[in-house]
Image (cartoon, grey):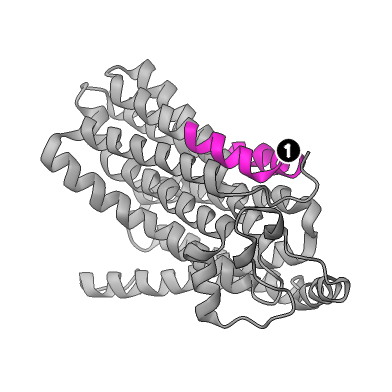
Amino acid sequence: MLIFAPDWGWVVAANVLLGINQGLTWSTTVVMKIDLVGPDKRGLAMGLNEAAGYGAVAITSLLAGQLAASHGLRPAPFLLGAAYIALGLTLSTLLVRETRGHAALEQHHRTSHLRPPRAATGPSSREAPSSRKALSSREVFALSTWREPALASASQAGLVNNLNFGLAWGLFPLLFATADLSLGQIGLLFALYPGVWGAGQLVTGALSDRYGRKRLITAGMVLQAAALAVIALADTFPGWAAGTVLLGAGTAMVYPTLLAAIGDVAEPAWRGRAVGIYRLWRDLGYAFGAVVGGVVADAAGLHAAVWAAAALSAISALIVATRMYETHPTAP
C-alpha cells in the first residue's frame, strides 16, 4: 500500500494496519518471553527484547534513509520492509514455538501452592487479584489502570515516559534549531537519546532482576525529570548533548523494568491482557506528548513545554515512590 499509494488516504490506512501489527506482534513477543524465562530473568529478557526492537528501528532508519537518498522514496526503502516481513515469517514458522504451555504450568504452580499475591505485602492488599479467581477483561482493565497499586503505577509511568518521547520527536528539533545548529549537530543530538536508551536496556533490565523494579523505575523517572530540566536550561550543543544522554539513560532504566513489573504481578491466566492494557496507556503517551507539547509550546514557548514534561516526570516518580510496592520477589 505504501509503495503504490496514489494519495494520502492510502498512507493513513497502511499505518492503521501497521498499528494492528504492533499489537499482534510486539505485545505477543513480550508475553512469550515472560512465559519462557520465569520470574528470575524477566528484566534481562525485557531488556534484550526492547534493545533489539529499538536497535532495529535505528538501523532500519539509517538504511532506509540511504536507500531513499540513492534510489528515491519509493519503492526502494519499502522493499527493505518487505524483506523483513519475509524473514520474520520464515523464522516464526520454522523456529518459534507456542509458549502457552509454560504459562499454564506457572499458573498451575501458583494455584496449587496457593501462594498469596505479592501485592498482599503492600498497603493495598485488599485489592490484590487472586490466583484462584478468573478475571474478566473489565476487571483486568481496572486492575491495570487504577485498582492494583503496582500495575496502575506502571501504567502511568509508561504513559509519562512515552509522553517525553513524543515531546522529543516533535519539539526537540525546533528547540535545537533556535541555536542555529547545523543539521548534522541536530541529527546527532536527536540520535543520542534513542541510542543511549536502546543500548542501556541491555544493562538496566538485568539490574532490575538483581536490585528490584521499584527503585530503578523511580530513579529513572527522576533522572528523566532532571534531564529535561538540563535541556530546558541549556542553549548550546554541549548542554543539550548532556541532557539528551541523561534522558536516554533515564528511559533505559524505566522501559524494560516496567514490563518486567507487569509480568511479576499479573497472573499467567490474564498476563497477556495486562500487558496489552499497559501498552495501551504507555503508547498513548506518544499522542499525549505531541498534544501537550504543542499546546504548551504555542501558549508559552518551547522551553515551557520542556519544563512541563519535567514536572510531569517528577510527579510520576513521586507516584511510583509512594504507591508502588516492590514486585520482584528476590530483590534485596
| 211 over 269 or under it: above or below | above
Residue 12 is one of the magenta-drawn residues: no
Give the residues in magenta: 199-222
Q: Mostly what secondary structure, the magenta segment? A: helix
Residue 198, can we see it? no
Rendered residue at 43%/70% (across/down): 18
- Judge from the rendering whether residue 207 lies leftward or rightward of residue 175; answer left or right: right
Residue carrying label 1? 211
Quadrant into which the N terminus falls:
bottom left
| 266 over 100 or under it: above or below | above
Callout 1: SS: helix
- Judge from the rendering whether residue 170 lies leftward or rightward of residue 271; answer left or right: left
Residue 209 is one of the magenta-drawn residues: yes
Rendered residue at 23%/74% (across/down): 9
Tell me where residue 129 appears, x and y as whole percent.
65, 70
Q: Amino acid at mark 1?
A: Tyr
Tell me where residue 74 appears, x and y as whole percent.
33, 61
| Front one among 96 and 150 | 150
